[in-house]
Amino acid sequence: MRLLWIPLTIALALVSFSAVAADYPAPKEADWIARDFKFHTGDVLPELRLHYTTIGAPSGQPVLVLHGSGSSAAGMLTADFAGQLFGPGQPLDATKYYIIIHDSIGHGKSSKPSDGLKTKFPKYDYADMVDAQYRLLSEGLGLRHVRLVIGNSMGGMHAWLWGEKYPGYMDALVPMASQPTAMASRNWMLRRMMLELIRNDPEYQDGNYTTQPRFLKLASVFFGIATAGGTLNYQKLAPTHDKADQLVDARLAAPMNADANDFIWAWNSSADYDAAQGLERIEASVLAINSADDERNPPESGLEQAALKRVKNVTRPAAISPPGWGSFICSSCRTCLAPRRSGQCNGCRTGEGTGR
């Protein structure tokens, strides 16, 4: 039970937001180069740049924080996440813990297609991303063990894979807005449609575009409305035809500074995700956190509950109340009413959102 103390206090912090976010030590950014990185496809990059952000001193207990699709380490440095966890006296007090937030392959300032390789960049998957994270921690930072791996959405799925691929490397796992089952059903169907819209845009030109294809924003906004925000919450935000139009107009007008190839590679990396086969290998204590009306991981499917029965040391809080997928990471942006820094707010995706 001692190992569950940190995950449980994290859960409490995330579902009972403080009115004022706490201050924490200034984040520090750095790069590490993974040499001769081999992808699951067999492709090898002689140099894979892995960017990361740290908070606190290396003498603290290491904690790995993992972001969602289309986001980066900056996406986890919100008042509603970092401000509830990393400050003095909070569950992951940065005077006691060494917080490491990695820009996953294809995201943020880590290596990605838009660096120059474009469509020649290796097609990576979640297993590749987790292996790169492990090399960063074990080789780059010289860490032999971490106290906790916590991640949101894609990062939550990474956390499940971490527990299976490197079962003795961490004490606890906190996967959020995710489940350890195959990428399928509506979650994958809508991802697939989003990617097909971009690929079939004449302006995409098989990835050799000179300006970003217009369908990139349309596809992203469509996916965001379909899979994030919460059904009941949308009824509150857009109870009339005019309000609904205003919400859509705001999202379409919000700036989006994304690259189409980066976007496709990042979202397609989830295609073969399935953590269900290795759940018995997990040794760490696990706290799984999802929203009550998560559109991508609907609790009523019963899939997660069935999967969790196969994990040795697991607890799951009652379905929590924030509206929709991933909304306990950040509240809504006034520009487009999407969850801020979630990867679905077009402005916040690039740090240009106007605030909560």
Image (spheres, grey):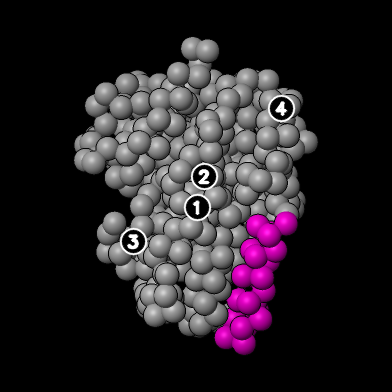
> Which secondary structure, mark 1?
loop
Q: Which quarter of the picture shows residue 315? A: top right
Q: Is residue 187 magenta?
A: yes
Q: CA distance from mark 2 to mark 3?
A: 19 Å
Q: Which residue is mark 2?
A: 291
Magenta span of residues? 185-207
Q: Earlier in the sequence, mark 4 or mark 2?
A: 2
Q: Residues within 10 Å of mark 3 (few under 14, many from 20)?
A: some
> How many C-alpha atoms fall within 10 Å of the one at disc 4: few (<14), some, or many (≥20)?
few
The percent position of residue 52, horizontal first and vertical second, equals 42, 43
What's the CA distance linking mark 3 and mark 4? 37 Å
Point out the tag, 2 or 3, that comes first from the N-terminus. Answer: 2
Which quadrant holds the C terminus?
bottom left
Q: Are marks 2 and 1 in contact (CB under 8 Å)?
A: yes
Q: Going 46% across and 68% down the picture, which residue do you hit?
A: 258
> Which callout, 2 or 1, points at the residue further toward the start of the chain?
2
Front-most of 158 and 134? 158
Q: Which residue is identified by label 3? A: 333
Residue under the point 37% across and 68% down = 336
Figure check: 67 above or below 115: above
**Residue 267 part of the magenta segment:** no
